[in-house]
Amino acid sequence: MSTLPSEWLIRLTVFLGVFLAVALWEALIPRRGRMFARRARWPHNLGLLVIDALIVRLAASATPIGIAIVAQSRGWGLFHWLDMPIWAAVPLGFLLLDLTVYLQHVAFHAVPVLWRLHRVHHADVDFDVTTGVRFHPVEILISSGIKIVAVLAIGAPAIAVLAFEVLLNATALFNHANAGLPARADAILRWWVVTPDMHRVHHSAMLRETNSNFGFNLPWWDRLFGTYRAQPTAGHLGMTIGLDAFRSRQDLRLDRLLLQPFRELPSRRVPRGEAVE
């Protein structure tokens, strides 16, 4: 399946640049203290990233960008049927792909079998740049499949898909930063992009807070669909990050992360404390 020239080089270059910039930002202006040192978490979170990348490369015979090129050459998808001009198809395609990821994220919280996979991401008891790449490989494969179906249905131009993929990876690193922004800057930025303070609410141990702020890239869907929450109840320094069922040092290990979806746990319904399991 052909893709845009240097697709992987572009994505890798942007990823590494943003990762290093956010890691430096965290080191210079940390927002919260850490429960565990980086050496206890980072090798396992980054190890999961490497496994995800290898599995996607081995298991997927097509990428969303490759599918977009094929769809364009064969006239598949809504935009091609409407003969939409490129100047309109690129921004609208980007918006619809971002809406797809928002709805997918909501589904991964609402559907129990999908939550089992997604809770690997939420079980991190610290919140930093490596949390943004901590996803179970099966979730990554499902997410890739959903994006491929969305690209086919929409008929989004390949350049829009590439821009979306690159920016989604970059903003996922940015909005998981354990770093501080001036309050005024955060208030302005969160109208245009999901900021760390906005997304940190989503990683709260309180159910009503973890079921809010689902956006990864654009913040508008949460406001539009009523899932926006401005601040955590306990404040950013007082809030508890993660899931109550996974708070030990052993739960940080790579093998535990891979097996976590298959562990049986009590129901997520907690009558009083609203802690998420």
Image (cartoon, rainbow, N blue to C red):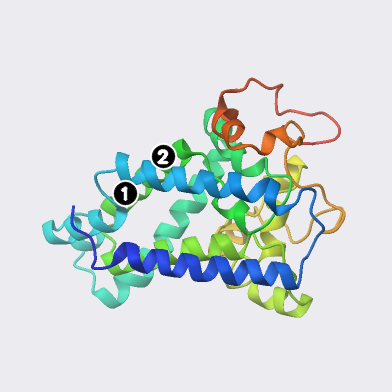
- Going by the numbered disc 2, the residue's amino acid type is Ile
Name of the residue lying farthest toward the left: 74
CA distance for labels 1 and 2: 10 Å
For label 2, the residue is: 142
Q: Are marks 1 and 2 in contact (CB under 8 Å)?
A: no
Quarter assignment of residue 44:
top right
**Element assignment for label 1:** helix
Name of the residue lying farthest toward the front: 39
Specify whether residue 214 is in view. Answer: no
**x 51%, y 39%: residue:** 136
Q: Is residue 185 left or right of residue 48?
A: right
Q: Which mark is residue 148?
A: 1
- Going by the numbered disc 1, the residue's amino acid type is Ile
**Could you say where residue 271 lies in the image, as x and y percent from the top left?**
82, 28
When the figure is inspected, residue 177 is found, relative to residue 152, above or below; the finding is below
Label 2 crowd bin: few (<14), some (14–19), many (20+), radius 10 Å: few
Give the quarter of the figure containing the C terminus: top right
Label 1 crowd bin: few (<14), some (14–19), many (20+), radius 10 Å: some
**Could you say where residue 170 lies in the image, as x and y percent from the top left?**
51, 65
Q: Is residue 31 left or right of residue 108?
A: right
**Could you say where residue 34 lies in the image, as x and y percent from the top left?**
79, 54
**Element assignment for label 2:** helix
Q: In this orientation, which residue lies closer to the viewer: 203 or 259?
A: 259
Q: Is residue 258 left or right of residue 152?
A: right
Quarter assignment of residue 8:
bottom left
**Could you say where residue 116 lies in the image, as x and y percent from the top left?**
57, 31
Q: In this orientation, which residue lies closer to the viewer: 57 or 156?
A: 57
**x 36%, y 69%: residue:** 10
**x 71%, y 79%: residue:** 185
Specify whether residue 172 is in view. Answer: yes
Q: Earlier in the sequence, mark 1 or mark 2?
A: 2
When the figure is inspected, residue 214 is found, relative to residue 20, above or below; the finding is above
